[in-house]
Amino acid sequence: MFSKSRNLHRRMKITKEARNLSRQLFQMSLTDGRLDRAKVNSLVQSVIAEKPRHYQGGLEAYQRLLRLEMEKRHAVIESAAPLGDGTANAIVSSLKQKYGEDLTTEFSVNPELIGGMRIKIGSDVWDGSVRQRLSKLQSLL
């Protein structure tokens, strides 16, 4: 029983070390608060070449941090019907003012929204759809 708890403690310690490595790598990947692809590639290559302790777990956690950061720079804009060019350009312009010029956008049509639109950027979600309003109304009744 003692060896099981010791092994569990070791796994937790490994996870903590890998997490620390991933955080260090992530911080070194930023230039002016933005991901620098050249730095990311260079860091990954150097970690693979050096193979520090727990590097595989660190790289997996680093990959997760990179994915989350990239999601913060990508907007998914769903609407019940196709948006006109003027409306789409106004939305993109507004979002870029708030999130930065490097924001990428993706438009899609989702008839299940019934009307309105939903915008998702990272963990931020603005849902102005008719479906959302109906769901709120239904929960109140």
Image (tube, grey):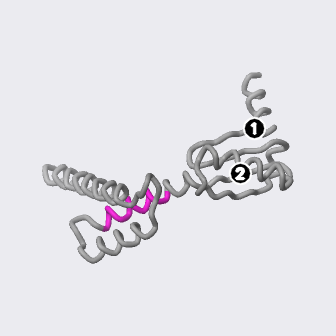
Other residues around mark 1 within 10 Å, as few (<14) / some (14–19) / many (≥20): some
Within 10 Å of the Cα at label 2, are there few (<14), some (14-19), or many (20+) other Cα atoms?
Answer: some
Q: Residue 45: x percent and y percent? A: 34, 75
Q: Nearer the viewer, residue 49 or 30?
A: 30
- Give the image quarter of residue 126: top right
Image spot of residue 115 (x, y percent): 84, 42
Q: Report the residue marked by disc 2.
A: 92
Amino acid tagged 1:
Gly
Q: Residue furthest bottom?
A: 49
Q: Are marks 1 and 2 in contact (CB under 8 Å)?
A: no
Would you say 52 lies left or right of 119 here? Answer: left
Numbered disc 1: secondary structure: loop
The reply to whether residue 33 is in sight is yes
First along the sequence among labels 1 and 2: 2
> For mark 1, what is the residue?
128
Which corner quadrant holds the C terminus? top right
* 79 left or right of 124 in image: right
Q: Quadrant of residue 131?
A: top right
Question: Which residue is painted at 44% across and 52% down in the image?
Answer: 33
Is residue 80 or residue 73 the one in the foreground?
73
Residue depicted at x 57% and y 49%: 122
Q: Is residue 82 visible?
A: no
Q: Residue 87 in the image: state x and y as whole percent.
A: 82, 49
Q: Report x, y in % for residue 101.
A: 60, 54
Highlighted range, magenta: 56-67
Residue drawn where x is 39% and y is 67% of the image: 39
| Spatial CA span between label 1 and label 2 | 16 Å
> Amino acid type of disc 2?
Val
In the picture, measured across the screen, residue 111 lies left or right of residue 65, that is: right
